[in-house]
């Protein structure tokens, strides 16, 4: 069964940086988009960043200019570099990977989530 393993979350002061990673294993199919959602108590889930298999990235307005998503296709790993962190970035971050089944069909797999806490 395909697995996504996340790491790199933690506690950081405002203005600091963290890098989270997401590694896909045991996937027979190639991977299309990878990205991160985040979820905080009392708030709707938000798509933070997404990156295509070719390396094209998009970001939520709330993180534009502060976060950078990248990927290493040989390792089936995506990275989310988070700089200039703010308390409002505090959330559980969940990565995903869209597996390419062919004919335009995808199956999304999810990571277990990692907590990011930013203190003021």
Image: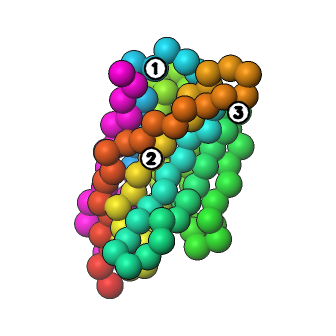
| Above or below, comparing residue 95 to residue 10 in the picture | above
Cα–Cα gap, marks 1 and 2? 15 Å
Q: Mark 2 points at which residue?
A: 95
Q: For the N terminus, which image quadrant?
A: top left
Cα–Cα gap, marks 3 and 1? 18 Å
- Tell me if residue 15 is in the magenta stretch: yes
Q: Crowdedness of circle 3 by 10 Å Cα count: few (<14), some, many (20+)? A: few
Q: Mark 3 and mark 1 in contact? Answer it, CB < 8 Å.
A: no
Residue 25: give x, y in percent of width and height.
39, 23
Q: Mark 1 points at which residue?
A: 27
Q: Mark 3 points at which residue?
A: 54
Q: Is mark 2 on a helix, strand or loop?
A: strand
The boundaries of the magenta stretch are 1-19
Q: Crowdedness of circle 2 by 10 Å Cα count: few (<14), some, many (20+)? A: many
Pick whichever, 72 or 105, lies toward us. Answer: 105
Relative to 62, is 23 on the left or the right?
left
| Above or below, comparing residue 99 to residue 62 in the picture | above
């Amino acid at each position: 069964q395909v697995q996504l393993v996340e790491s790199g979350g933690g506690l950081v002061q405002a203005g600091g940086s963290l890098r989270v990673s997401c590694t896909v294993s045991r996937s027979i199919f190639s991977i299309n988009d990878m990205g991160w959602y985040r979820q905080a108590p009392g708030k709707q889930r938000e798509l933070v960043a997404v990156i295509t298999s070719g390396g094209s990235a998009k970001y939520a307005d709330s993180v534009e200019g502060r976060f950078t998503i990248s990927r290493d296709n040989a390792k089936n790993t995506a990275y989310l570099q988070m700089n200039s962190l703010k308390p409002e970035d505090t959330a559980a971050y969940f990565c995903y990977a869209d597996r390419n089944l062919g004919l335009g069909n995808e199956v999304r797999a999810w990571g277990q989530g990692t907590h990011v806490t930013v203190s003021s």
